[in-house]
Image: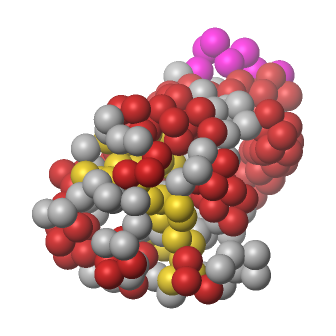
């Protein structure tokens, strides 16, 4: 019998744009300029994006998560500035606030989670490089009270689809894998990750390699009648 529902965050509960160079980062640029960075804003953001991309490629196979502090330390070193002279967490706060300014919750997601909470224990597993951003967004969208457990990859150490982050969350929620279902939007990170520990997974959107019964238009279209037949 299903007792717990585990959710992805980005692309599942909130609408976001994963790109990092299309928006403005004036406050981030200003902070770094104060520390001696001579680049204009666009050039600086492109440098950050290039370092970010290298980290992502390295982490894809290892599934060991990196942090925004790691990113900025490399960026600053490359610009001949000692990272120890900069508050990297403050810089990460500023950057992630500017990156996430256009993020919006899925329509009706709060009502949806409130209804589910009456029947199930709810948990959240999200890949992120800065945990305070997730906590801030959950609070901003008034979603924090619905989740008994929130696990971020940067705090856990492994990113989805590594099985350890799924197993850790299930243990924190005192659930057996047969008692839980995962809901996400990424075939690799969410579907393969959940399947890798033996957990059923619904995916938002169209996915050629996922059975039709496990594809949903949006998270609020989760077929609750189907959940009652699982486990």
Q: In this view, does 122 lie above or below 21?
A: above
**Is 146 situated left or right of 35 in this image?**
left
- The x and y percentages for residue 101 are 45, 63
Residue in the image at 63% along x and 55% along y: 195
Residue 116: quadrant of the picture: bottom left
Residue farthest left in this picture: 118
- The x and y percentages for residue 54 are 86, 42
**Is 58 situated left or right of 224 in this image?**
right
Near-viewer residue (61 or 41): 61
Residue in the image at 31% along x and 72% along y: 228
Magenta part of the chain: 80-86
- The x and y percentages for residue 127 are 57, 47
Task: Please tell me whether residue 82 belongs to the stretch shown in magenta.
Answer: yes
Res 230 seen here: yes
Residue in the image at 53% along x and 41% along y: 166
Task: Please tell me whether residue 29 belongs to the stretch shown in magenta.
Answer: no
Q: In this view, does 3 lie above or below 105?
A: above
């Amino acid at each position: 019998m299903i007792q717990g529902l585990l959710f992805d965050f980005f692309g599942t509960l909130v609408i976001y744009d994963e790109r990092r160079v299309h928006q403005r980062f004036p406050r981030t640029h200003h902070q770094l300029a104060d520390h001696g960075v001579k680049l204009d804003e666009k050039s600086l953001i492109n440098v950050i994006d290039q370092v970010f991309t290298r980290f992502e490629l390295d982490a894809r196979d290892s599934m060991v998560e990196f942090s925004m502090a790691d990113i900025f330390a490399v960026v600053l070193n490359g610009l001949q500035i000692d990272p120890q002279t900069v508050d990297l967490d403050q810089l990460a706060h500023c950057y992630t606030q500017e990156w996430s300014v256009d993020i919006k919750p899925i329509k009706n997601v709060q009502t949806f989670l409130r209804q589910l909470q009456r029947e199930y224990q709810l948990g959240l597993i999200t890949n992120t490089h800065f945990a305070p951003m997730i906590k801030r967004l959950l609070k901003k969208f008034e979603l924090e009270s619905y989740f008994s457990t929130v696990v971020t990859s940067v705090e856990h150490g492994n990113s989805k689809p590594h099985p350890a982050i799924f197993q850790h969350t299930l243990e924190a929620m005192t659930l057996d894998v047969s008692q839980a279902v995962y809901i996400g939007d990424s075939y690799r990170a969410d579907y393969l990750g959940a399947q890798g520990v033996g957990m059923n997974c619904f995916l938002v959107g169209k996915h050629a390699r996922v059975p039709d019964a496990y594809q949903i238009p949006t998270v609020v279209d989760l077929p609750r009648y189907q959940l009652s037949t699982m486990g």
